[in-house]
Amino acid sequence: MNPLDLGKIQAAAAAIDYLEDGMIVGLGTGSTTNHFIAMLGDLVAKGFKIGAIPTSQASARLAESLGIALIDINQAERIDVTVDGADEVDQFHNLLKGGGGALLREKIVAHATDHMVVIADRSKRVTDLGAFPLPVEVTSFGFTITAKKIFDVLRETGCSDADVKLREAGAPGRPFVTDNGNFILDCSCGHIPDAATTAQALNAIPGVVENGIFLSFPHTRRTIIFGDEDGVEVMGGVVGV
Ligand SMILES: O=C(CO)[C@H](O)[C@H](O)COP(=O)(O)O
């Protein structure tokens, strides 16, 4: 097996330790989270009881197919633990997410969560964010104007590169549409020198629904689990870190 895939599986298996019977659990989106959902399905089949809040239709379908009970997010006051992947994790445990196009629901769920457990293979570990193109969810209305404003923000906030591309779905010219009916602009940033400033400036643009920079939330504990073929490294776990 590819060492990166093994790392994803190791990280997903380690995340199971953070669950307790009766919890409300947020389910992220992506290939790493899919391993976690499969393992959770095995636990549920053995009688473990949780209510799950998925961050995408894809994760909802997978969880349902495995007999995991889903909860409507609007019926939940809070979420005990969310397990989700990441495209990059920086030295301060800020995340770059949205490679799977689910960043809006992922951020809503993460922000409503007491303890976020991030699972990733070691290739996702970086010093600063930005080598992976930053996904930004935008309204379809006026998206070319929004794209120009985003380009300006990337330049103004010191990113070393600024190239904004509409994400396509399978065929040239056919936009990828998110579960929320929006488009994704993938933004090559090169190096993002100040993730907080860039994230704030992006969200201030009319037409931007949300961006893929997940800063630490002061009210949420964040644990990072990096996996590789030899095992896992667990970091963080302190509120606001
Ligand atoms: O943010 C995400 C989806 O919107 C994913 O968590 C991120 O893209 C990582 O995916 P994978 O586990 O497949 O590497």
Image: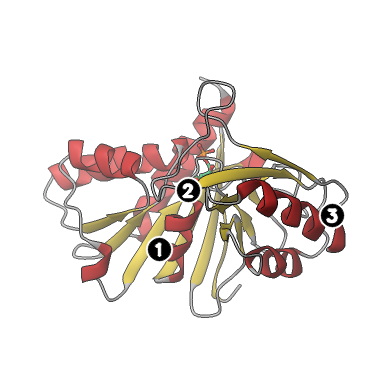
Q: Amino acid at mark 2?
A: Asn
Q: Which residue is mark 2?
A: 182
Instruction: Please name the residue shown 32% across and 43% down the image.
Output: 57
Q: Are marks 3 and 2 in contact (CB under 8 Å)?
A: no
Instruction: Please name the residue shown 88% across and 50% down the image.
Output: 160
Q: CA distance from mark 1 to mark 2?
A: 18 Å
Residue 34 occupies quadrant: top left
Instruction: Please name the residue shown 40% across and 71% down the image.
Output: 112
Q: Nearer the viewer, residue 114 or 224?
A: 114
Decide: few, some or many residues near mark 1? Use Cα within 10 Å; few <14, some 14-19, many ≥20: many
**Residue 134: % across, % down:** 67, 48
Q: Nearer the viewer, residue 181 or 116?
A: 181
**90 left or right, relative to 211:** right
Decide: few, some or many residues near mark 3? Use Cα within 10 Å; few <14, some 14-19, many ≥20: many
Q: Which mark is residue 109?
A: 1
Which mark lies nearer to you, 1 or 3?
3
Considering only order in the chain, which callout, 3 or 1, is on the residue closer to the N terminus? 1
Decide: few, some or many residues near mark 2? Use Cα within 10 Å; few <14, some 14-19, many ≥20: some
Residue 113 occupies quadrant: bottom left
* The C terminus lies in quadrant: bottom right
Considering only order in the chain, which callout, 2 or 1, is on the residue closer to the N terminus? 1
| Residue 232 visible here | no
Q: Amino acid at mark 3?
A: Cys
**84 left or right, relative to 78:** right
Which mark lies nearer to you, 1 or 2?
2
Q: Is residue 132 above or below residue 153?
A: above
Q: Amino acid at mark 1?
A: Val
